[in-house]
Image (spheres, rainbow, N blue to C red):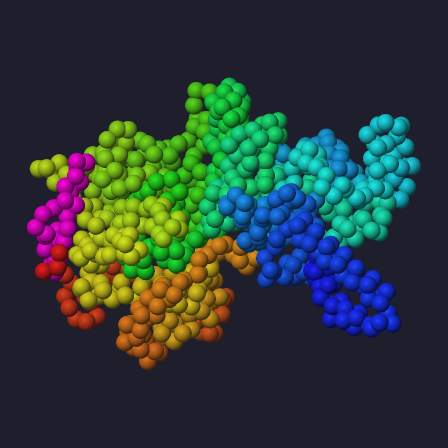
Amino acid sequence: MNVFEGLTRVPRIVSETKWGRGRGDSDDSGGVELTEAVESAARLTRTLARRSVNVAPELDEDGFFTDVAGNETLVGRDDLERAVPAHKKRHFDEVERYWVNRPYAFVIIFRSKKENELKYYVIEPHLTDVESELLEFLTEKLADAIKYSQEAEHRNETTAERAEVIEAETKRLLDRYNLIDDGLAQKLGMEGGSRFSRLAGSVADLFGEDEEDGDDRSVRETRGIYPPEEAVGDPDGIAVRPRPAVEADGYDALTEYQIEKLLYYLKRDFVGYERIDGVKHDINVEDISCDGYNSPVFVYHTAYEQTISNVAYEDDSLDDFVVKLAQRSGKGISKRQPQVDATLPDGSRAQLTLGTEVSDHGTNYTIRQFKDVPFTPVDLINWHTFSLEEMAFLWLCIENHKSLIFAGGTASGKTTSLNAVSLFIPSKAKIVSIEDTREVELPQRNWIASVTRPSFADDEAGDVDEFDLLEAALRQRPEYIVMGEVRGEEGRTLFQVMSTGHTTLTTFHADSVGEVVKRFTTDPINVSKTLFTALDLVSVQAQTRVRGEKVRRNQKITEINSYDAENDEINVQDVFQWAPGDDGFERQRGPQILSEIMFDRGWSRRRLEDELRKRTVILAYLIEHRISAYEKVSATLQAFINDPDTIIALVAQDRLESSLDDLREMETVFMDIDDETEALVPRPKPDEETREQAAEILAEAETMLESYREESTPGVEAALPADLDWNTESGGDVGGSLPTEIDVDRSLGDAVGAAVDADGEEPPARPDPVADDVAFASDDDESDDGVRTTRYDEE
């Protein structure tokens, strides 16, 4: 219970005692005094209520500010009170709070009743004026003592390793100046008026009381009060205490609490991202932007959209920070070259502008956050970005080497979807990704991640662009090419790659299929329309609103059929379309691409439907059991691709979830995500409608699942790739050798052996342009951009 809670209980506690009820006529004076005390306590309570932050009533603050070891965190309620200006506390109500770098920094979301808008506050340990001065002193000394920045980058030192250097040098300086000794003033021995003398005389008062509502913003803004690129560890064994307790004890030298606070800021400023480091550490933030001098930093939060924060810069500090970001990215920025596109060390994409040459408001930056742990197909279904049926369709298509473009506007979720559906690529396939900024993250180990490199010369000689990487990729014999985004002339080469049989997944800025065709078939890309039909699918995504809430939706999935030379048009067909009225997805009949897969694989129509059903069942099972963690979903999908019968059997016997640890042992898939990092990912939970749909799919598949329950199925090791060294004779222990006679390729990717379906039907003939069970509608939809949309209606 904190002080405020305790005081609010005083009037009630007293009123419930015999003193509050009165003691009779013989003791009137005591009753009067007690009544006055109760009234004073009530006034004090009202005063505290006006001057305290309105926190969520259901929040256990003691639990929030305590770590797993039972120690109080470095930042506490006192720091929260000091971070919020007194005049704003009256109309700020807490909406949510969470740690971004425990125990050093947390984020709290307020709603302002006065302004009717949300506020994003980063809360870090409060520094007094003297602490800020001491921090500045140590910063200058460390800058002279440590010349690691570019050298450390060259040596590929990690953030944690560089943080260790900062900590060691700081402790050396503290020891050198005896800042942790009672004889601090004598040891420094500086002349009056010098900075060191003032520091020496102030150490005894390091934690003296500040003015209650004093404005120490000028000192704090010098360094910023906002955690590192990655956590650098907890203050092990330190009994962290809130600042008032330290003040009350009257310490005359630095304590462990104070040292940890100084170390935190030094590591944050030297190794992290200074005052926006807490925001950088927030996995819920997609974009961070500062629009100019003396402008607050805005964040795009996944739950609260664009929100103003309590972080701001002055002119010089913003200039210095942008220059620092450019240098960390290996770029130079100056008045001669005032704008730079950069990739930060953590993979985030940054657009930097320096000065007022090209921006009236001065220096600005926008950072697009890079997520270490991507979202999965299950997340996209739970968000309703795609339907369950759509995702199963994409799974079957991608697994069977169909090329796909995700089209849409800015922030429509194209790259998120690209990363998610890349989990459908078989782990045995060789993948080459091509990007100018690292955004693609795959679990498959047989993956070459290629990134462009700018020229080091003014004449652009020696630069490596997407076109160069695409040409090089052809010599690397990939089965799948994943391209972050197509922007220019490299699009022509990309379609030539598609036409030679290389499956390609990429993104493109366009808001419709017609716009995709128009932009690709005109300058500067200028792909011929006959070559454009090498593409199989286009998924158009958009950011829109449903019932007032901003959401991302796949508006349609369209297949590219053929080129009509007579009318100079490309025939396309919508396979799925989003219905805004009920926020659902409608499937069109007779997609040609499924007929192509059916022919290529030698499947009957019944087998095709069965394969689609199995994939739908797997996704429905993951949703119903709320399995959405990246490692678990990846392991399930890849194990199914390798051996569908074993995984379906595990689903039928309800043993899949308990077998996931074994499935994650695949050597062809690298999954090394710690539980703490995974827990920070804001994965959506399925709503009631999605759970009901998943349950309905599993119920409809009960007949199929029952047949798998009755059959004896191999162990989990059967679902693992054949190149993993399993000892099947010893119950699946790693370390043995595979028998010489074993069916190691039961993958859906194997076209051999599937020519005749299990039900005895003959393989289908090559499909006509229109599937057997559908017919043309009476009219085709034509547009001005050379696209004919063919509608199919059921006979």
Measuring from the top left, give residue 235's x and y in whole percent: 71, 52
| Front residue of 500 and 554 | 554
Give the quadrant of the C terminus.
Answer: bottom left
| Front residue of 84 and 233 | 84
Residue, x 39% and y 48% (percent of image)? 550
Q: Would you place residue 505 above or below residue 622 in this image? A: above
Residue, x 39% and y 32% (percent of image)? 465
Measuring from the top left, give residue 91's x and y in whole percent: 58, 48
Is residue 231 visible from the viewing direction of this image? Answer: no
| Front residue of 37 and 508 | 37
Give the quadrant of the N terminus.
Answer: bottom right
- Looking at the image, residue 678 sits to the left or right of residue 71; the answer is left
| Front residue of 372 and 8 | 8
Is residue 689 visible from the viewing direction of this image? Answer: yes
Q: Is residue 787 magenta?
A: yes
Measuring from the top left, give residue 362's x and y in whole percent: 53, 25
Q: Would you place residue 48 above or below residue 647 in this image? A: above
- Looking at the image, residue 328 sits to the left or right of residue 547; the answer is right
Examine the image and state in which quarter residue 14 appears.
Answer: bottom right
The mark total stands at 0
Residue, x 86% and y 65% (percent of image)? 29
Examine the image and state in which quarter residue 22 appears.
Answer: bottom right
Residue, x 8% and y 37% (percent of image)? 566
- In the picture as drawn, the residue positioned furthest to the front comes out as 25
Q: Magenta region: which residues?
A: 767-792
Measuring from the top left, give residue 643's x and y in whole percent: 35, 65
- Looking at the image, residue 780 sits to the left or right of residue 10; the answer is left
Q: Is residue 111 magenta?
A: no
**Secondary structure, magenta segment, majority class:** loop
